[in-house]
Image (tube, helix red, strand yellow):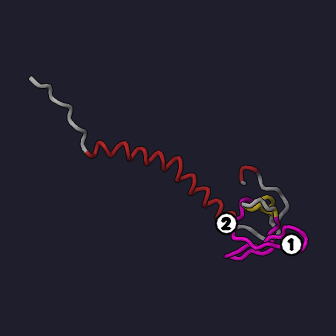
Amino acid sequence: MPQPSAAAPGPLAMLVPFAMMFLIFYVLVFRPQAKARKEHERMVKGLKKHDEVVTSGGLFGTVVNVKPESITLRIDENVRVEIEPAAIARLVKAKGGEPVPAEKR
C-alpha cells in the first residue's frame, strides 16, 4: 500500500514568510533611512547666516547666504563657494556660537 505524500503548502502559507521578511527589512532598513533623511532636511531648512557647517566633501565653512536652490559658504577670507543644500553633511556650530551636541550631528 503506497504511503500518502505530504500535501504541498497553500499559496497563502507560502506568502507568510515573505511578508515577515519584508516587515523585518522595513523596520531595520527603510524606516531608519527615512528618519535620517527627514532629520537632514530639517537641519538644512533650519540653517541661518553665520552657522558653521561641514560639507559632504569635508569643507568647513560659515553660511553667508541661504537660498532654496543653493547655500553660499565662506571657507576663508575672500573665498566663497556656492553649494547645493544636499551637500551639507552636518552643523558644527549654530549661530549663537554654541557647539551642536554629538547626538544631534
Q: Please tell me whether mark 2 sits on a helix, a strand or a loop.
A: helix
Whole-angstrom CA distance, mark 1 to mark 2, is: 21 Å
Which residue corresponds to the image point at 43% horizontal and 44% vertical from the top-left?
21
Determine the image quadrant of residue 67: bottom right
Residue drawn at (69%, 63%) of the image: 43
Q: Is residue 18 depicted above or below 50 in this figure?
A: above
Instruction: Please identify the residue farthest to the front as the structure is shown.
Output: 2
Screen quadrant of the C terminus: bottom right
Q: Which residues are magenta?
A: 61-90
Q: Main secondary structure of the magenta part?
A: strand
Who comes first in sequence, dot 1 or dot 2?
A: 1
Give the foreground label among 1 and 2: 1
Residue 18: which quarter of the image?
A: top left
Other residues around mark 2 within 10 Å, as few (<14) / some (14–19) / many (≥20) = some
Q: Is residue 75 magenta?
A: yes
Q: Which residue is mark 2?
A: 86
Near mark 1 (Cα within 10 A), the count class, few <14, some 14-19 or many ≥20, is few
Residue 63 % position (x, y): 80, 69
**Which amino acid, by three-letter code, is at mark 1?**
Val
State the mark number for residue 79. Answer: 1
Vertical position of residue 89 compared to residue 26: above or below: below
